[in-house]
Image (tube, rainbow, N blue to C red):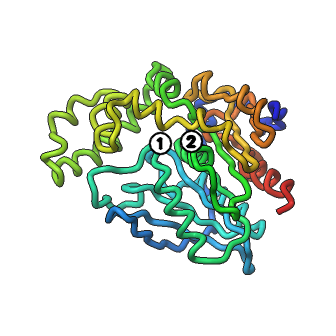
Amino acid sequence: MPLIPSKYHPPKKIFRNSHVSTLYAALFRKVESVKQKRERLELSDGDFMDLEWSFAPNKTENCIIVFHGLEGNANRHYVLGTAKIFNENNFDCCAAHYRNCSGERNRVFHSYHSGRTDDIKAVIDEVLGKKKYRNIVLKGFSLGGNLILKYAGENPEIPTEIKALIAISAPIELKGAMEQLQTRRNFLYTQNFLFDLKKKLKIKSEIFPEQLTQEQIKAIKTLEDFDNIYTSKANGFADADDYYRKSSAKQFLKNIKIPTLIINAKNDSFLSESCYPVNEAENNPILFLEIPDFGGHVGFVDENNVFYNEKRAVEFVRNLQM
């Protein structure tokens, strides 16, 4: 499917600036009146993930499952915005916290990463086992977008209940995205990510001193260092490059067999040119790629505190006539 022309126009000129829209969405937006109920999902390796449920006003056969971005969580306002609009449109919502992201440390040495699709499957299986939903939509932000696209493309058969995928600001080619993140214009973002990630690593080092030392943590100066020293080794990859290569969703897009919408803003400072899968969209009739001029990273600010990506997601699902 060729590129979809985007209808997104920021309500104010200031939100044409990538950093303004990104930071406003991350730090200042508030979404009220979403009541979440937490449940714990026990995983087969002895670890756990926490899930946040919110519900449509009436009983429904529809559910959206939402996956957040790097060092986010299921209580972030970009997640709540999606939960709210889908609850209002007759969908229950299950928003997943990744391992170590719900406020409680996980039990094992490894953690979540951009390619851990076994955790995506575990959440989907849990949702299908809880209630008899007929229609399920997966929506992922940033790292979560890469995860759901990889999940759908690497599995020849996924549950028939899954009717659509929606990926927002998805870094589908991880090496390129990492190189972008390490540029000067993204310095503050990467330092914030590193602060949170290293804080968690220090706790892991205290629990698993034979697998990770404080000296190794001190040697981490960049996100790529983090992936070389921890992510790759803890999760069975040779090094960071091996992790990026095997975990990038772009290589799997040609295999996706259910309607999929990807919205990556042209001015997203986190994404490299390789994260805009134009050729893949042109050669897969059910892969829809939208590249708005503006929006930054998960920052599609729009009127009435309802973001463009939320409105588009509902519109996309409605047009499927499930």
Considering every residue shown, the one lying at the far top of the view is 184
Amino acid type, callout 2: Asn
Question: Number of numbered discs present?
Answer: 2
Numbered circle sitting on residue 321? none
Q: Can you identify the residue that label 1 sits on? A: 114
User: Percent position (x, y) of residue 8?
Assistant: 79, 37
Which residue shows up at 20% across the image and 32% down it? 218
Which residue shows up at 46% across the image and 33% down it? 189
Amino acid type, callout 1: Ser
* SS at mark 2 in the image: helix
In the rendered image, which quarter contains the C terminus?
bottom right
Which residue shows up at 70% across the image and 39% down it? 263
Which residue shows up at 59% across the image and 57% down it? 66
Q: Is residue 90 left or right of residue 111?
A: right
Numbered circle sitting on residue 146? 2
- Is the C-beta separation of discs 1 and 2 under 8 Å? yes
Task: Check the image and report above or below for 124 versus 26.
Answer: below
- The span from disc 1 to disc 2 (Cα, nearest Å) is 7 Å
User: Percent position (x, y) of residue 123?
Assistant: 52, 63
Considering every residue shown, the one lying at the far front of the view is 156
- Residue 107 visible at all: yes
In the rendered image, which quarter contains the N terminus?
top right
User: Percent position (x, y) of residue 300?
Assistant: 69, 41
